[in-house]
Amino acid sequence: MAVLELPQWTALAPALVFVATALALFVIDSINPHTRNRSLLAGTTAVGALAALGVTVWFMLAGVGTPTAEGGLGVVELFGGQFVVDQMTLFFTTVVSIVTALVAVASYDYMADHTYQSEYYSLIMLAATGMAAMAAANSLVTVFIALELASLPSYALVAILKDNRGSVEAGLKYFLIGALSSAIFLYGISLVYGATGHLQLEAIADNLDGADAYGGLLGLGILMLIGGFAYKTASVPFHFWAPEAYEGAPAPISAFLSSASKAAGFVIAFRVFTTAFPVEATTAVIGIDWTTAFVVLAIVTMTLGNFAAATQDNVKRMLAYSSIGHAGYALIGLAGLSADGGELVMGAAMMHLFVYGFMNTGAFLFVALAEYWGVGRTFEDYNGLARQAPVACAALGIFMFSLAGIPPLGGFWSKYILFTETIGAAGTNGAMLVVAAALVVNSALSLYYYSRLVKAVWIEDPIGERDALAQPIGLYAAIVVAAVLTVVALPAFGPIADAAQQAAAVAIG
Amino acid sequence: MMIEALLAVTLVGALVTFVAPNRIAGKLAFAISLLPAGLGLWLFSAFDGSGNALLEGELAFESRVEWIQIGEYTVSWFVGLDGISLPLVVLTTILCTLAIVSSWTPIDDRESQFYGLVLFIEANLIGVFAALDFFVWFIFWEAVLIPMYLLIGIWGGPRRKYAAIKFFVYTNVASLLMFGAFIVLVFSLGDAVTSFALPEIATAMLEGGPEAFMGVAGSTIAAAVFVAMFVGFAVKVPVVPFHTWLPDAHVEAPTPASVLLAGVLLKMGTYALLRFNFTMFPEQAEAFAVPIAAIAVISVIYGAMLALAQTDLKRIVAYSSVSSMGYVILGLIAYTQFGVGGATFQMVSHGLISGLMFMAVGVIYNATHTRMVTDMSGMADRMPVAVGILVAGAFGYMGLPLMSGFFGEYAIFFGSFGSGRLPYSQVFTPLAMFGIVIVAGYLLFALQRTVFGPYHLETDYDVGRAPLHDVAPMFVLLAIIIALGVAPELIFEMITDAVDPILENGGEL
């Protein structure tokens, strides 16, 4: 295909499309600084995100990033290995661009009365650029830069409702914890550099033997890196910003952060730990198997997220804690790595993040719709909505049951493949059996609070009289598309599963 | 492709009904449901399979397409019918059509959603009986829960919310247990299986059995998996002591949902026991024969005693299901042609008879708005036809010759009494037969008080003859019950043909 003749740097095209869209939005803003032309702004953003998606899918089909041994065009390394475009990069870029497109379409209605329209959309695009860069970053320096590029616009986005105390407070909390974890992450990078003398991920792996004398230093560095990832993926112990930030932020931004940003956080965790710190070699140097840390984190994160979610009365907070719970599920991908491989578990975690991208975005967008209607925030406020808005509520039912992992929906496949592979990994690492048990218990528990929301909208009767509900076209379209994707993900899971497993196999090598 | 056509027609019909106007939804759903019912009868007449689906039998209407590759395991879309599943599929399609007609009177709120969900349940039930790949089967198995949860939760009685959530949590937790056990089994079978196709797993189980996995001996794993799966399915059946969700769900569910719950959903449990536990684990079934037979007999006697203590007609019928399902388990554990064949026959027969009973109670309730035995007497005076059918159904329950209940129970007792595989079978069988006496006791007692004697009603309703569309479905059911009682070989031949291969693995022909 024509991809062959393009120069190497075009492999970063998805990220470039995002940044170009952000610049286009700046141009629109500079021509007319106070433009409220929502169609133009949201439309440009959505088109940009869809263009990035199109390029990514085209690359995937053309074989960019697929190893030449499997008939692809080979993994693209750029700037001396600082960036890499392989199947994992493209896989996660797909997630980011789909979520970005959905969020842009939904924001058309949600942000209708907002003053800073073009700023809002360009910040989304810049954050998406950072996330796409995270998917490609292959050195601790580029990882950190991409991480900050994704984080800084996110702080502003959370706090963008400047007249709303909750939004501003959430933005501040998010920023302070983000700054703390960035500092820890950076310190971890410096320790790893001190021990191995390298920042590029393959080079770190090659020089692990030389770090024998600094085993403790390296171990501490790795621990600090884990802290940085935990922040970006909203996992224990840096999870506590998530409920505050998601609750205070505009709901589309909550969707954006909890889906795309979390997936991007996982891609750097997957890449750094599989490429730079192979289990066997690292264990020989630091004396501890780092997967143990992820076993503990996975169990604690999913349990804490689910138990906290079960006690919430506020729907948005419930979804925030459920997103922490899902981070715990995805962490299994790292916990299940072993000297013999573990690409199946990691592939399963990637599938879960993929499907989670639609269903969780959809759930938060329903909250956005409810905020747009002004019906209130608690479960009781949602009572009986299905009588007035059956289509949106049917979509909500799809998201909730899919998040709970009930068939026939996309979330079923990813969660059950994850479960299957966790038990498979238990053959080499007995601790995975505990993880599998925790996964089952948490899934059963999660059903309680997910079905509680379904029960509220479908089964309960409304508390008081409610005015007729509007049907904002953008929000409705985004929700319905997310619901359709969640349903279609079930029959069409074959390609998703193949892509994830191949990507994981290549990454683990 | 016929099974796919059957599923597609039902699913598309469900969607169409869901968005149809409430006014015509009932009639529309009835018209649509005639298609799967007709197709089901056509499948019945064109059936050309032989042997058991899991044990190298000739499948009818088979189709198999690769779907997803999970590591080294293939998941396929794999469906087909044999002599055990075909009668259950036909039962499902007929019972759903009749249940739809019987809901015309009681359902007067959100009709399109109600009928849409009934058709959606029908599709999933067909899928449960037709699927031959574990994942496909599990998708349908779990997907039944969502519509049933909503049917009970939205259209149920006063305590519907409690009943719906109890039903959902009980059966879902049981499914998770069963699912986990089955995955462990597949992994412990090692290289002998490369897919989740049930026939392949059954062959591997019968030829080699599990290897050591995670340091646990293969025989221990087989026993543990057998017990876990038995418990998982026993909740669905249900047997004592896992039966407590059943009376709540039945009493609160609207009549058509009760018909489907008792008529088909309970059979999912016994069908799965036959397919999984008793086909794949003949050795373990023999080792656990005494405790399982004890559970069966306790369910028969205790269920009947509970029914005897009720004053709510619907509760009486609900508890009698526990009792009847005990017979089925007894027949299965006997491992003789009449035992297992009779148990399968009894699944169909009980589906018809309990469906009829629930419909009859529903018709009386529609008119009187009470189900309490103490609130009414002499109903035969006002509703002679409906009451006549109720009495006929009760006699079917008691096992009156020339009705299908007689043949089912007779075959089970005949098969279990002479079983050489079941120790103390000459003790268990007479104990279970004593259950019939209690059944006759509570049914006759309830009928005597409600149906006969001078007319009296506590509630202020004018009771007249039931409308034709309420009575017609009951006549159809009664006709099928009598037809199967007079000529059981209509389905018993194909059942024994499919059951015999199971018995070749350690049972008695």
Image (cartoon, rainbow, N blue to C red):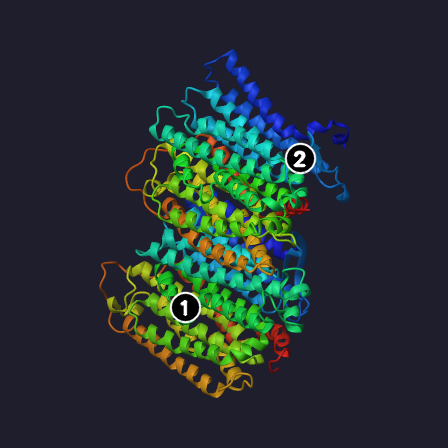
Q: Is residue A309 visible?
A: yes
Q: x, y percentage for residue A345?
A: 59, 51
Mark 2 vs mark 1: in front: 2
Locate residue A274, reporting x and y percent: 62, 45
Q: Residue A384 got which mark?
A: none
Residue occupying image coordinates x 76% and y 41% = A68
Image quadrant in which you'd find residue A50: top right
In screen coordinates, is A118 left or right of A274? left
Residue at 43% x, 79% y is: B297
Identify the image quadrant of residue B157.
Answer: bottom left
Q: Respond whether the residues carrying marks 2 and 1 are from the same subunit.
A: no
- In x, y percent, where is residue B444? 33, 76
What label does residue B242 carry, if any?
Answer: 1
Residue that numbered label 2 is attached to: A84
**Callout 2: residue from which chain?**
A
Residue sitting at x 33%, y 65% = B383
Q: Would you say B434 lies left or right of A118 here?
A: left
Q: How many numbered marks are there?
A: 2
Q: In front: B238, or B207?
A: B207
Q: Are marks 2 and 1 in contact (CB under 8 Å)?
A: no
Per the image, label 1 sits on a secondary structure element best described as: loop
Residue B13 in view here: no
